[in-house]
Amino acid sequence: MVTIPEYYAGKNVLITGATGFMGKVLLEKLLRSCPGVKSVYVMVRSKAGQSPQTRITEMINCKLFEKVQEEQPDFAEKIIAVSSDLVLPELDLSKDDQSILAEKIHVVFHCAATIRFNEALKDAMQLNVLATQKMLALAHRMKHLEVFLHVSTAYANCNRELIEEVVYPPAVDYRKLIDSLDWMDDELVSALTPKLLGERPNTYTYTKALAEYMVQQEAGDLNVAIIRPSIVGASWKEPFPGWIDNFNGPSGIFIAAGKGILRTMRASNDAVADLVPVDVVINATVAAAWYSGSQTHSRPRNLLVYNCTTGGINPFHWGEVEHHVISTFKRNPLEQAFRRPNVNLTSNHLINQYWIAVSHKAPAFLYDLYLRLIGREPRMMKTITRLHKAMMVLEYFTSHSWVWNNDNLSMLMAQLSLEDKKVFNFDVRQLHWAEYMENYCMGTKKYVLNEELSGLPAARKHLNKLRNIRYTFNTVLVVLIWRVFIARSQMARNIWYFVVSLCFKFLSYFRASSTMR
């Protein structure tokens, strides 16, 4: 078999979702590690008055593309922006663009999807199912297409404890559901949604499962593969450690913990945190397309599904995540932290609600009251409300564990040459979690919050100030409560005077011993 760079040499690749987190990394990886690729077409819609080409030009000027810029100064010439909107009829492609794509494309990476967990069912169906259906229809017209790779999620079948690398049939026929949603109003759809979801926690996982089945049913003679990443996090190694550019998923939670805003979270310390670095997912994705595309004469009978997860290979738990996040942000604090980082994980709902009231809402209310008194607009309660919404969305995933079969992923790794295993590494057995989590946290500081490392001394000084304030407040509070208690009890007064006299004796002894020296 040819190597991965050899396979992509001279080929035209089409990517949807190229402006998203994974799409950017996929685009950069293809251009940098497969320098022979002919062109990469990216389907992008106009947004905020910006044309697709303008959006792509701005996107490739970020730090992510610095390495490929150094190695291949003219890499941008290979990127061709195609104006498209996946929710509109015929993907909103012009006739000319449809013809060009049909004539030229060899490989399709369909990454586009809505990742909002609480999206309305109609909207989630439009973006995750119907858009995929339109992409398949377009793929059927491509004369030289070798592989169509669909990016799904490992949680598409989270209603199962054991998830094999197969497509599971849904309880509802997706065709009938699409027809029904056409005539239903939003109120009726909202009432019906919980029954449709069943044991799944949200519309995201439900529609991604429907999309998988639809791909299997409508692929026809297309060569199709599906990759299922779990919780995609910051980069492990490529193009550099810790790259992340958004607040989605765990990143926002890590930042909230580092800022001292998040103090409690409902999660099981022993539940597996199935984080997978984005470069691991992209390397596996590029390799999966290579394997399916190069097997034209001996194609597997069944559609290949790859569970791209870490829990069964190199497990890491939410309790460990909390430890590494807090320790990293104590050593390398975020600027202008609200409180010192400290998070309590609990699986008990009542205990979690108590800590939310004591550690989240009460301090936020007092801080907003202080802001009002000095004439500034209160903001902390709004921040806490947004944080709680994000936490509620993640609760299901931080409180459960799953077992994913990874046989196909292991098979794919075994097919790689020694050089490809180095360049397109997705062997998570080599992943050192403590180092990765530190890079991840530092990545949120540098690339999401845009904080310079030169500001660390000031941030550490601010954190020490917060520690002193906390100690002072706790001491005053204990003394006040104790004094109130003393006023009511002779025994308490006796204990108080005994403790104070011991303290004075200790101080006198310490001074005397110091003088003798």
Image (cartoon, rainbow, N blue to C red):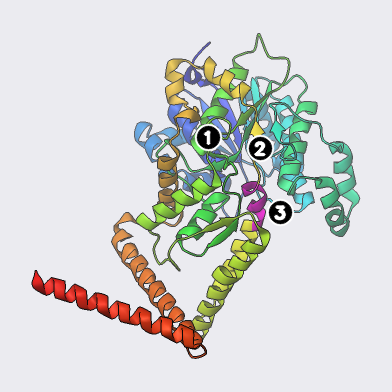
Asked whether residue 379 is in view, the answer is no
Q: Position of residue 93 (x, y in %)?
A: 69, 39
**Amino acid carrying mark 2 in the image:** Trp
Q: Is residue 466 above or below residue 137?
A: below
**Amino acid carrying mark 1 in the image:** Leu
**Amino acid carrying mark 3 in the image:** Asn
Q: Which residues are magenta?
A: 392-399
Q: Label 1 crowding class (10 Å Cα cut-off): few <14, some 14-19, many 20+?
A: many
Which is more N-terminal, label 1 or label 3? Answer: 1
Front of the two marks 2 and 3: 2
Picture residue at 57% right of the left edge, 33% below the top: 41
Mark 3 — residue? 118
Q: Position of residue 104 (x, y in %)?
A: 61, 24
The image quarter in which residue 23 lies: top right
Residue 243: assigned label: none
Mark 1 — residue? 26
Secondary structure under tag 2 reads: loop
